[in-house]
Amino acid sequence: MRPVYTNRRAHYEYELLERFEAGISLTGSEVKSIRAGGVDFRDAFARLQGHNLDLEGLYIPEYKDASYNNHTPRRTRRLLLNRGEIEKIERQLKIKGLTLIPTRLYQKGRYFKVEVALARGKKLYDKRRAEADKEARKEMRSA
């Protein structure tokens, strides 16, 4: 279960409240591109559409072999969760200020999974405090 991509910026920008493991609907050329190491979801977020979750902003570049490409790099991709999990997320998203963002993309067996987290945006002073705590821990470790 090695991560293909980790959204490290999410930990800095957001306070992560609850995490969910979701499958992701991909085409063959997208899988090939991800395995080749090309994926970026810095600007990605999940949106509730009816009773489905869609991941938007996930960028999967075209594969090197031009004859094998048949996907759009920034299309909306369906997230696969149980109905109970979707309903739980739906209730949480009604709370003002919460959003659903992807934090990791990894391979589990032969399938790719996305870890999405309910998150609340941090204020600037929260980011400064987190940075100061990180520096303090670093100094304590070195001492």
Image: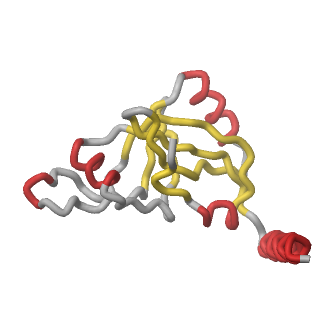
Instruction: From this view, report whether residue 34 is shown above or below residue 88.
Output: below
Residue 67, x across and y down, in percent: 7, 56
Question: Looking at this rendering, what residue extends furthest in the front direction?
Answer: 143
**Position of residue 82 in the picture relative to residue 117 (left or right):** left
Task: Please count the marks in the image.
Answer: 0
- The image quarter in which residue 20 lies: top right
Task: Name the residue rendered at 50%, 47% in the picture.
Answer: 2
**In this view, 87 is above or below 130:** above
Question: 137 or 51, which lies in front?
Answer: 137
> Residue at (56%, 60%) from the top-left corner?
7
Residue 13 occupies which quadrant of the picture?
bottom right
Q: Residue at x 16, y 51 (%)?
A: 70
Task: Give the answer, above or below, for where 74 lies relative to 91.
Answer: below
Residue occupying the far left of the picture:
67
Residue 53 position within the rendered picture, expressed as x and y whole percent measured from the top left = 48, 38
- Residue 57 at what x, y percent from top left? 42, 58
Residue 49 in view in this figure: no
Name the residue at 30% across, 57% down. Answer: 36
Query: How did the renderer colour the structure?
Result: secondary structure
**Where the C terminus falls, by quadrant?**
bottom right
x, y percentage for residue 16? 72, 51
Res 15 visible: yes
Q: Nearer the viewer, residue 117 or 65?
A: 65
